[in-house]
Image: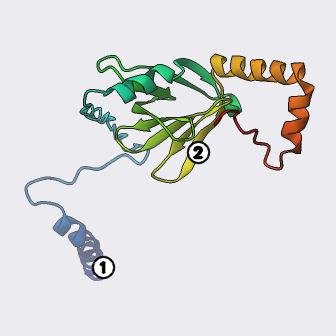
Amino acid sequence: MPALSFRSAAAALILSAALPALAQAPANKPAAAKPASAKPAPKTLAKKTPPPPPEPVLTDADETQLAAAERAHLGDYACEFKESVHIQKHPKVAGYVDVVWKKNTFTMKPVLSSTGALRLEDVTGRTLMIQIANKSMLLDTKIGQRLLDECVHPEQERLMAAAKAARMQDPEAEAAAARNSLGITPAAGK
């Protein structure tokens, strides 16, 4: 008889150990055993591409803006660190240009500044491209940082080569410019 009570005690112990696991499983579903070597199925996340930003509303360009747009150097620019930027006329509205850099396209309004530089102002207010005689640069106006510098269009290269050749032809003008403490030669007749 003592062996029977030992068996009863062992069965009760096993049953009491299994009861918490059975209490957690739903009553109508048997607990499914997973093989130890089974890996969880990988979650596949479909990448959602964000919709393109809405196209900005562009007003008709006035004569000043149209004249400024004609001064913009269109085409490819070679920039520092082997970067490049491309400027083209806006396909729908005259007087605007599109600046393409990496995968970004910025629609810009050309504006002549009082210094003679050409400002290409992003219509969304995010970026600014400045064209001066010897280079161009792309700026992020929100964070106050240059995105691209030392961008040179073939026309700017031609103008720099012509200016260098003119200096070589007139050494006295070169010496006079060097004597000027700021390196600025005033324009005659103004």
Contact (Cβ within 8 Å) of mark 2 with mark 1: no
Q: Nearer the viewer, residue 128 or 160?
A: 160
Tell whether 76 sits left or right of 37: right
Residue 96 visible, this angle:
no
At 9% across and 60% down in the image, what residue appears? 27
For residue 6, the mark is: 1
Residue type, numbered disc 2:
Arg
Q: Residue 80's image quarter?
A: top right
Residue closer to the observer: 20 or 130: 130
Q: Residue at x 66, y 33 (%)?
A: 189
Q: Secondary structure at mark 1?
A: helix
Write down the residue under mark 2: 146
Q: Given the image, on which type of amino acid does mark 1 rest?
A: Phe
Q: Nearer the viewer, residue 5 or 95?
A: 95
* Way the structure is coloured: rainbow
Residue 102 in picture, x, y percent from top left: 51, 29
Which of these two is toward me, 36 or 58?
58
Q: Secondary structure at mark 2?
A: strand
Name which residue lies at 33% across and 38% down. 45
Q: Is residue 9 above or below residue 39?
A: below
